[in-house]
Amino acid sequence: MMLTRGVRLKVVAFLLIGLAAVAVVAARYVGLFGSGGYTVTMKLADAGGIFPNAEVTYRGVPVGRVHTVDLADDGVDVALDLNQYDIPQDVEATVANRSAVGEQYVDLKPRRPDGPTLHQGSVIPQSATKIPLPAQTLLTNIDSLVQSVPEDSLHTLVDELDTATHGTTTDLQTLLDSTHSFVGAATEHMPQLTQLVQDSATVLHTQNDEAQALTQFGANAKLIADQLRSSDADLRSLIGTVPQLSVQVSQLIRDTDPSLGVLIANLLSTATVALGRHDALQELLISAPPAIAAGANAIAGGTANFGLSLTFFDPLGCTAGYDGTDRRTGLDAAAGHPLNTQARCTLPPSSGTGVRGAQNAPNG
């Protein structure tokens, strides 16, 4: 079949246009026409696994590619070819892993939405960059952690956990169900929970102010723990005795019922009376032991031991406050005057006289 001249010209034109399109696409891919955007230098202390042609994202949206990765005096300079997007200059650049196989990319996150934007020649300093933790460092730290765990203690922990959870399938299921309900309730009341977390800052500041007291509390708690450890045998004996003691106490309460209830009710009245005389009872309890001790030593070996010291007007008797009392001689047999209930010594205890009167007794 013969092709006409017009058809041949159309085929040639189509081939030329196709070759030109492929050439343009290839040229743009290799960057012969420029990136059409601008280049920003990101300074890193370590490459962190980033490589040329890695993707650059801003708020999770692709905005460019890594052009080159070059060594510098203070670390690594990474050239980022960014498209024509307005990206704040105050950004945090993070070398992140996109997947578990270690496909790194650069993620730009703004520290504030306003301010100047990145432009040709801008530099992102090391202080605004982050790199992922190297896998070898992570594995080394995990290995050190595993090696630091005492095997005997770990075996004991596993055995104790087995003992604690053996036969508790139903209880654990109930716990998980309750946790699910708890999470649901927390989600339902998220505004209140958020407010609670925000208000907790006040409590945390208070705890920080009381850091020294908390440190002292921790030290004292350690002393208590040490004492409990040293008294382990006594505590075990006490724990073994408590059930038997509780049975005896319960039996005593049952045997004395209802008399015990009546006795406790009556003791309430006695306690009320004693409470009103607290100071006097305190003075009595302080003075009674020396008096009882002296009385016990007064009679010994069939004889009475005591001393008598006569003093007259030493100290002087108190007369102030008795002026309103009518004096009577011993020969006056007439009806007496009304009792002067206001008569008392009005001198202070520090006057040096024999101060007496109810006003000097402990109040209460």
Image (cartoon, rainbow, N blue to C red):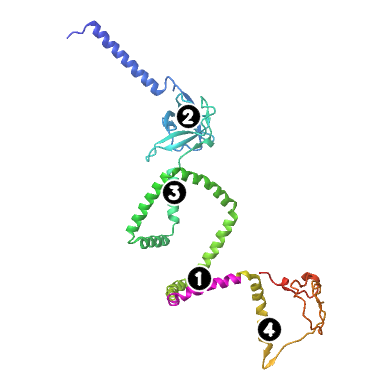
Is residue 127 shown in magenta? Answer: no
x then y, percent, for residue 266: 53, 73
Q: Secondary structure at mark 3?
A: helix
Label located before the other in sequence (2 or 1): 2
SS assignment at label 4: helix
First in residue order: circle 4 vs circle 3 = 3
Determine whether, in the image, residue 341 is placed left or right of residue 147. right
Mark 4, residue position: 294
Task: State the mark number for residue 79.
Answer: 2
> Which kind of residue does numbered mark 1 sit on?
Ser
Residue 364 locus on image (x, y percent): 66, 69
Percent position of residue 252, x then y: 44, 76
* Nearest to viewer (mark 2 / mark 1): 1
Does the image show residue 52? Answer: no
Q: Give the CA separation, mark 2 to mark 3.
A: 31 Å
Q: Earlier in the sequence, mark 3 or mark 1?
A: 3
Of the image marks 2 and 4, the number of the one nearer the N terminus:
2
